[in-house]
Amino acid sequence: MAELFRGLQRSIESLYRLENLEDVGQFCLAREHLEFFLGQAAERTREVLLVKEAGEFTDVGLYVAEEVRQRAEQFLEVHISGPSGALEHIDQFCVALEGVSHFVYLTFCGNAQERPVSRIELELQAELDKFLFLRLTYPHPELVERLFVQVHIDPTLDGLEVERYELANQRALRYAKWLDRQIDRGRAASALEDARRLYRKPLSEKLEHINRAA
């Protein structure tokens, strides 16, 4: 189970040139663990990064539902030989990648930058991670549309959560369109350098950077 998540972590680390991070495979939770923490809510959960602060220490655990993991692996298997016209199982793949993205960014901010990280930062960075990974690895003409326009926010979320997801989606869409244009114009290397600088900025600077660049 952990090998998929370790592979995704290595991809994110390579993309942003990150080093010396915790191994996500050591923090994976099984369904019974999630049921212990969330009770009946575990039945509706496809992916969650559980974080609990205890004094100077932070406990972290990543859960991704087994059916999501299987579909994510199928997505990779279909596209492993090159770009495919089909986007089957891309949703489940993005769910798995989002969970790993949350873990990597949380541990990077906590360990390398020694700063707290907000939920909106996690969501915004995960949106960008999904776009960049897929754009560089499995490009598809409808990728931006599929990731940022054809989305549905869970109606059971409260107002603050909905606002957080909408803000992350809108800002990520703006920056993704800019990245897409740069890559199409043969400027992938400079676009990646820009994305790496963005990765290391706190939220306020991230939003300013996106507004300037895009």
Image: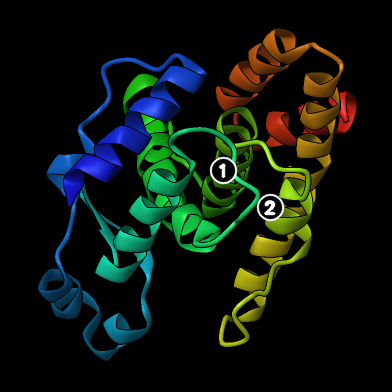
Which residue is located at x 47 percent, y 42 percent?
Answer: 117
Q: In this view, does 76 lie to the left or right of 129?
A: left
Q: How crowded is mark 2: few (under 14 residues within 10 Å), some or many (20 or more)?
A: many
Report x, y in % for residue 195.
65, 22
Report x, y in % for residue 27.
17, 47
**Quick check: can you spot residue 57?**
no
Going by the numbered disc 2, the residue's amino acid type is Ala
Question: Can you identify the residue that label 1 sits on?
Answer: 130
Hey, which residue is sitting farthest bottom in the picture? 40
**Is 12 drawn above or below residue 171 in the view shown?**
above
Which residue is located at x 65 percent, y 16 percent?
Answer: 192
Residue 168 - label: 2
- The local secondary structure at tag 1 comes to helix
Report x, y in % for residue 102.
42, 46
Which residue is located at x 20 percent, y 72 percent?
Answer: 34
Q: Is residue 18 left or right of residue 2?
A: right
Going by the numbered disc 1, the residue's amino acid type is Lys
**Quick check: can you spot residue 184?**
yes
Tell me how far mark 1 sits from mark 2, CA to CA. 13 Å
User: For residue 50, what is the image quadrant?
Assistant: bottom left
- Quarter containing the C terminus: top right
Frontmost residue, 68 versus 193: 68
- The local secondary structure at tag 2 comes to helix
Report x, y in % for residue 206.
70, 31
Q: In this view, does 63 lie to the left or right of 18?
A: left
Which residue is located at x 50 percent, y 19 percent?
Answer: 16
Frontmost residue, 38 versus 15: 15
Of mark 1 and mark 2, the one earlier in the sequence is 1
